[in-house]
Amino acid sequence: MMPMLLLEEKQSASNRTPRQINRNVIFNQVRMRQPISRAELARVSGLQRSTVSLIVEELLRERWIVEGLIGDAPRGRKPTGLHVNEKRTVLAVDVHPAQTTLAVADLSGRITTQRELQLPSEPQKVIRAIVSGIKKIIAEHADCSFEGIGLTVPGRFSHQLKKTIFAPNVGWPIAQIKSKVEEATGLPVVVDNVANACVLSEVWFGSTEEMHDIVLVNVSEGIGTGIFVNGGLVRGAGEMAGEFGHVQIDRDGIPCGCGSRGCWETLASNRAGLRYYKEITGESLPSIDVLLDLAEKKDPHANEALTRMFRALGQGLHMIVTTLAPSQIVLVGEFTRAWARACSIISDELRKFPLPALPMLRMATEPGTARLRGGVALVMSEKLL
Ligand SMILES: [Zn+2]
């Protein structure tokens, strides 16, 4: 087995310290292989046994992991198994313009409770509804110790200003969501754009440290991208980097929530897929899931609508491939239910351009819960590192 970590190379490329990277590697190996012994950890991580022991003691002291007996050694000291401390949990809150998903997850990203919350139509009542949903789920889990709340938003959150600064698809006051949830719960709340959170989750919960240049594209009501380059998130001035969704593709296109028109997201988001279906049939569908259901039943109009959406996705991804040359593009969204078809249309579209090499296109590690795991990763990467 190849060693997991080439420290010298990483040091220059990553904005995390070697100690942070090693803690992350050890914790992730415990998470994936629990219960696991120290000797086994040294073997699978490729790290020195002394380094492993030091980090394990630290993680035990901070109660991220716990130790129990495993196996039956005939004599001498019994080997001990390390596993993730199940009593510590995170609340993940995935905010969409019209609904919000709440989930309780353990530190390994395993979701134990999940609940949908339809948001009220009156803008002034929305935050209150989210806060009361959060308080209710915390009250129901009185036996859990919550490390914090990881809140993903369909917009840009400024860590400097501590508020959401750009959320063109949200029609209610989302700016102060962090402080409102913090005040109501007394828990630390980590907020970020959903695509940033998802790309962190791919790195955080990923099995290796090799993912260094990865772009995650979240296709939902709009399109968001999270860019992880040279071992760190790209945020840019005012934390506005990565708004590929608002690059104009069609100058005569339809108006976009950002004030411009013909932006990539007006052509390739879930809303675009539904609009194409309506253009073809004259019929409105309630959600992208219904469109995907129809396509699975071989409805030709639904398939045509999805083909248009996937072609437009490919066109926009071309910008990302050309500008950033990522080794991987991870796609998140309901449309990944039709992955084989989407992937083939997107790849065909990318091949139309003279690119040196196509990046690997793939779905998130656990596509169904990618956004919620993103929320968990936000809290974990802040607390554990
Ligand atoms: Zn726009």
Image: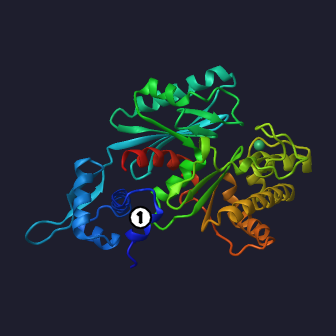
Disc 1 element: helix
Going 64% across and 20% down the picture, which residue do you hit? 124
Nearer to the camera, 335 or 217: 217
Image side of residue 203 versus residue 39, left or right? right
Going 51% across and 56% down the picture, which residue do you hit? 232
Image quarter for ligand 1 equals: top right
Q: Determine which quarter of the picture holds residue 228.
A: bottom right
Residue 343 image position (x, y, % from top left): 71, 66
Q: Determine which quarter of the picture holds residue 22.
A: bottom left
Residue 362 image position (x, y, % from top left): 62, 65
Q: Determine which quarter of the picture holds residue 50.
A: bottom left
User: Given the current orientation, which residue lies at the most extreme left position?
Assistant: 76
- Callout 1 amino acid: Gln
Q: Residues within 10 Å of mark 1 (few under 14, many from 20)?
A: some
CB at disc 1 and ligand 1 closer than 8 Å = no
User: What colour-coding does the image apply?
Assistant: rainbow
Image side of residue 69 versus residue 279, left or right? left
User: Taking the image as drawn, is residue 11 in sight?
Assistant: yes
User: Taking the image as drawn, is residue 115 in sight?
Assistant: no
- Residue occupied by mark 1: 11
Nearer to the camera, 221 or 341: 221
Going 71% across and 37% down the picture, which residue do you hit? 169
Going 40% across and 53% down the picture, which residue do you hit? 108
Quadrant of the frame with the N terminus: bottom left
Residue 172 image position (x, y, % from top left): 67, 27
Image side of residue 308 versus residue 174, left or right? right
